[in-house]
């Protein structure tokens, strides 16, 4: 378990699959994610069961420390594609409970995830991608210290238009500079 000021990150649990189904079948959420097909319980359970064999990924659910007695989770986050040789990974986050968005939790989760990657996993580079119309996520990642490295032009189709996919990353040296400031 990873503990921050207001949130903590716990392992994914099968009992929360109903929430995953709610979030990942909601177009308001999935418009920002790679997944777009309707998700059935069977698909979600297969995905969950396959996670234990995936050595290059670590998944967490997000809990609010002040609301622990309710056993509620508000979203998920994950580290993917962990590369031992390059000491690099990618990451992702979803605050699926919409009334918990825009309250600073996403920023805190990403900061905790970055600390974990650099100081527990001893990684050196964390990469993510964000669609250009997702200004809130872009802003969140910038606040944490991710910088734009490039764009995959017109890589994503949404509502009749193509949009750029922005590649962002943070290096351990960037993070160390930031925490000293
Ligand atoms: C993206 C996400 C993780 C951000 O987490 P969050 O808890 O909502 O974000 P925070 O409250 O920590 O920070 C959001 C920042 O963006 C700003 N913001 C919100 N809406 C914005 C918009 N439309 N344009 C620009 N900035 C915006 C907020 O003001 C805040 O910045 P501030 O602290 O300087 O005021 C969360 O909203 C989410 O999961 N969204 C749905 C799925 C998703 O987009 N996942 C990421 C895919 S790349």
Image (cartoon, helix red, strand yellow):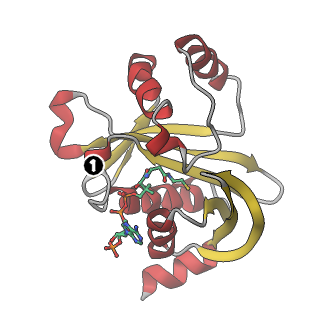
Residue 120 x, y percent position in the rendering: 55, 54
Q: Is residue 158 left or right of residue 63?
A: right
- Name the residue located 45 percent from the left edge and 35 percent from the top edge: 26
Res. 124 visible in picture: no
Residue 72 sits above or below residue 165 on the image: above
Work out whether residue 173 can be spotted: yes
**Mark 1 surroundings: few (<14), some (14-19) or many (≥20) residues within 10 A:** some
Instruction: Give the percent coordinates (x, y) of residue 126.
Output: 65, 62
Would residue 54 appear left or right of 68 to someone viewing this image? right
Viewer-proximal residue among 73 and 152: 152
Query: Residue reaching furthest front?
Result: 160
The quadrant of the image that shows the N terminus is top left
Residue under the image location 20 percent in, 35 percent down: 68
61 or 163, nearer to the observer: 163
Circle 1 sits in a helix, a strand or a loop, which is it? helix
Expressed as whole percent of the image width and height from the top left, the position of residue 40 reads 55, 16
Residue at the limit of the structure toward the bottom, as seen here: 181
Q: Taking 178 as reference, is 160 above or below it?
A: above
User: In the rendered image of this protein, does residue 104 appear above or below residue 146?
Assistant: above
Q: Quadrant of the C terminus?
A: bottom left
Residue underneath mark 1: 100
- Quadrant position of residue 155: bottom right
Task: Tell me if the residue at label 1 has its CB under 8 Å from ligand 1.
Answer: yes
Query: For ligand 1, which image quadrant applies?
Result: bottom left
* Residue 49, quarter of the rendered image: top right
Q: Residue at x 77, y 68 (%)?
A: 153
Residue 77 versus residue 26: which sits nearer the camera? 26
Q: Quadrant of residue 46?
A: top right
Residue 76 as seen in the image, left or right of residue 58: left
Residue 63's x, y, as percent? 31, 40
27, 110: nearer the viewer: 27
């Amino acid at each position: 378990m990873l503990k921050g000021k207001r949130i903590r990150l716990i392992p994914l649990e099968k009992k929360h699959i109903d929430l995953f189904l709610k979030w990942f079948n909601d177009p308001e959420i999935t418009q920002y994610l790679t997944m777009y097909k309707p998700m059935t319980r069977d698909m979600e359970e297969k995905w969950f069961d396959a996670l234990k064999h995936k050595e290059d990924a670590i998944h967490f659910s997000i809990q609010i420390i002040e609301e622990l007695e309710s056993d509620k989770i508000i979203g998920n986050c994950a580290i993917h594609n962990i590369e031992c040789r390059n000491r690099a990974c990618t990451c992702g986050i979803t605050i699926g409970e919409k009334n918990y968005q825009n309250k600073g939790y996403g920023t805190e989760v990403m900061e905790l995830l970055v600390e974990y990657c650099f100081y527990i996993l001893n990684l050196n580079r964390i990469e993510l991608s964000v669609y250009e119309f997702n200004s809130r996520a872009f802003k969140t990642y910038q606040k944490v210290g991710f910088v734009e490295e490039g764009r995959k032009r017109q890589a994503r189709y949404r509502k009749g238009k193509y949009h750029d996919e922005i590649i962002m990353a943070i290096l351990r040296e960037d993070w160390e500079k930031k925490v000293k400031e």
